[in-house]
Image (cartoon, rainbow, N blue to C red):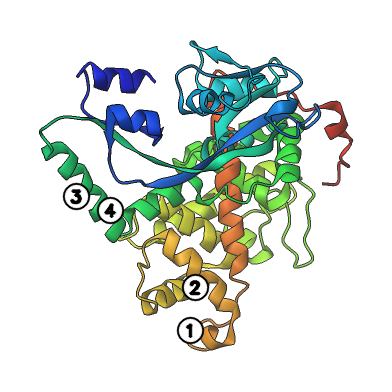
Amino acid sequence: DDLLDKISKNDIHIAAAGLTITPEREKRFRFGPAYQEITEQLVYNASNKRPKDLSHLDGSLEVVANSSHEERLRHLKETMKSLSWKPNHELESEELLQLVSNDIIEYTIADSNELLLNQRFHINLRVAFDIGSPQQLAWALPQTEDSSLFIEVQKFFKKIKENGELTRLIERNYGHIENFDYVGTKIFMRHIEKRLPAYQDYFEEAARKQAIDWRLIAAMGYQESHWNPDAVSPTGVRGIMMLTLKTAKELNVKDRLDPKSSISGGARYFKQTLDRMSAEITEPDRTWMAMAAYNVGYAHLQDARKITRKLGKNPNLWIDVKQALPLLAQSKWYKQTRYGYARGWEPVRYVENIRSYYDVLKWIEESNIVTTPVPEEFLKIPNSI
C-alpha cells in the first residue's frame, strides 16, 4: 500500500485508511486499537457462474498489488499451488469492483465493508464466498522506540469507544446499508433512468428555494412514491411526495397529483419540519430526524426522543432515537407518551432507505464513473412498481 510505504519512509506518521491488520504488516508496523471487523470476499458478476472455491475460478482474478488481499493469496498458494492471480499496480479496490461489474475481469477480492458500499452502485456484484476468518481494521504507525504517538492513538480510541462516538461514526457510514436490498436497488436504478429525468428540474427548483440538496428531496420523493405522480395510498395520501389533504391545504397545494406542485409542497413541508428541530440536534442527525418526523409526525418523534432520554441515551442522536421509535408500537411505552401509539418501525426504515437512495444519487452526479447499465432482463419489471 502507498500509505504504508510512506510510513516506512517516514513521510507520514499515521495511516488511517481502512487498513487490515495482517501477520506480515505486524512485522513492519505498529497498529492501534482495532475499530471495525471485516471479511475478505471473492466477488464476481451476477451474469456469470458462481465459483465454488478458489480452485474453481473460471477466469482472471485481479487484486490490488501488495494489498492485504494479495498477502492472503500468497499465503494460500503455499498449499494451493495452482492458484494464480494478477496483481494490479494501477487501480484501487473500488475500481477493480467496477471492472467486475462491467464484466471486464471475472473476479476480485474486496473487504466486506467496501463491497457493501459499492453494491448499491454496481447492482450486479455478488459474493461468491468468504476467504478466511474475519479480520480487523486499525490505524498503522511506524515501529519506533518513541511510543508517545502510539499512546495518544490508544487514548483517542479509548475515548471514542467509551463516549459512543466510534459507534456513531460506523452507523453514519454503514448503518443504513446493512440490509442491502438487491431487488429494490435494481428497480431504483431503472427508475433513475426512466422516471427521474421528467421530474429532476422540479426537484432542483423546489430544493433550491428551500436551500436543500435536490438529491435529498428526490430521494424522499422516491421513497414516497417511486416517482409516480399518480400514486395514491389506502390512507388517502397522494402524489409524488404523498401529501395528506390537510398538509396540502396548509401548503396551498391545490392539486396533489400535479408533479411540480407536489414536489414544491413536499420540499416546503420538509424545510418547515427541519426548522422545527431542536437547536441541540446537529447535522446530519438533524436531517435524519426531520425525515422521520415527515413520515411519522413531529409529535411522535418528540415522544420517541423522550423515550430515548428515559432509556439513558441521547435524544439528539439519530442512532439512539431510531432504537426508541419502534417502542411507540408497544403498549408498555406508548401509554407513557403524550401522543400514543405509532408504527414506529416505519420511520426508521423510511430514513434508512432515503439515506441509501441519496447516496446513490450523489454518487451518480459527483463521480466520473459511468453507472452500470441495467441488464435487459431487469427492465421486465412492471411499470406499476
Determine whether label 1 and label 3 are within 8 Å by CB: no
* Residue picked out by circle 4: 160
Q: Which mark is residue 155?
A: 3
Q: Nearer the viewer, mark 2 or mark 3?
A: 3
Of callouts 4 and 3, the N-terminal one:
3
Q: Is residue 206 above or below residue 276?
A: above
Which residue does the image show at 22% across and 23% down from the upper left?
12
**Residue 33 placed where, x, y %?**
30, 46
Of callouts 2 and 3, the N-terminal one:
3
Residue type beneath disc 2: Ala
Considering the image in quadrants, where does the N terminus appear? top left
Q: Nearer the viewer, mark 1 or mark 4?
A: 4
Q: Nearer the viewer, mark 4 or mark 2?
A: 4
Q: How many marks?
A: 4
Q: What is the crowding at mark 3: few (fewer than 14 residues within 10 Å), some, or many (at least 20)?
A: some
Give the alpha-carbon distance from disc 2 to disc 3, as whole Å.
40 Å
